[in-house]
Image (tube, helix red, strand yellow):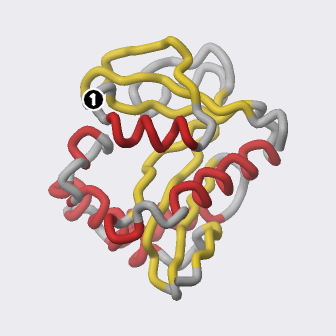
Amino acid sequence: MTLAVRRVRAGEGERVRELRLRAVSDPGASIAFLTTYEQEVSRDQAFWDDRAAGGADGDSAAMFVAESDAAWIGTCTVLVRRTGDVDHTGRRLTSGRADVVGVYVDPPHRGTGAIDALLDTAARWTAAVGFETLSLDVHVDNARAQAVYRRAGFVPTGETFTGPIGAELAMSRSLRTL
C-alpha cells in the first residue's frame, strides 16, 4: 500500500461526494458528522464542485485526501474562523480559530497511519497560515475518535458543550513545534 496525502483539487467534486457519502454511511457517523446520508445524497453536483474548489485553494479552508494506490481512503478539512464568525456548531467566536472537521478514514484502512498522515498534514497547513493551535470538537461518547486525536497530539481544552449532535468535547493541538 502506497499512502499519500494531498490537498483536494478543483474539479474533484464527484470524488469528494463519493467519499463523503461513504463517511456518513459509516455506522459510527451519527456521532461524528453534523449531516446525514440523506442530507448529503440530496445535494446537487454543483454543491460538491464548490466544496472541492473551496478546499483546493486559498487560506480560509483546506480539504485534504488520503490516497492509497490512487484510491481515496480518507479525508479531513481545516476551516479557518475569524473573530466574530459563527462556527459549525453555532457558537460565535471571540477569537480566530482553525478547526479540523470531517475527519474520516475508510474502515479497511484504519490503523494504517492514514489518519495520522491526514492530521499531520492539516496541522502543517494550519501552522503555515499563521495559527498556533488546531482545534476540533468530538462527541463525548466517541471514545475511539478521542483516542485517535489524543495519539495525534490533541488534548481536551476543558470545554464541553451541547452541539447539534449532542454533548461534545473541545480538543486542541499545539502547533508551536511545527
> Residue 178: percent from the left, percent from the top?
83, 44
* Image point (65%, 33%), residue name: 173
Q: Is residue 146 above or below residue 3?
A: above
Q: Which residue is mark 1?
A: 141
Disc 1 marks a residue whose amino acid type is Asp
Across and down, in percent, residue 166 comes to 25, 24
Camera-nearest residue between 91 and 152: 152
Position of 58 compared to 55: left or right? Answer: right
Residue closest to the eye, 119 or 1: 1
Could you say where residue 144 lies in the image, as x and y percent from the top left?
A: 35, 41
Residue 136 in picture, x, y percent from top left? 51, 34
| Direction bottom: furthest residue | 69
As drawn, is 74 to the left or to the right of 173?
left
Residue at the image position 44 percent from the left and 61 percent from the top = 111
Which image quadrant for residue 126? top right
Q: Find residue 172 and report its image quarter.
A: top right
User: Residue at image x 43%, y 50%?
Assistant: 102
Q: Which residue is more in the foreground, 61 or 7?
A: 7
Q: Is residue 75 left or right of residue 32?
A: right
Identity of the residue drawn at 27% across and 46% down: 35
- 35 vs 77, left or right, is left
SS of the residue under disc 1? loop
How would you rate the neighbour count of disc 1 (Cα within 10 Å): few for under 14, some for 14-19, many for 20 or more?
some
Number of numbered markers: 1
Query: In the image, is residue 19 above or below residue 153?
Result: below
79 vs 122, nearest the viewer: 122
Please tell me in which quadrant of the rendered image residue 132 appears.
top right
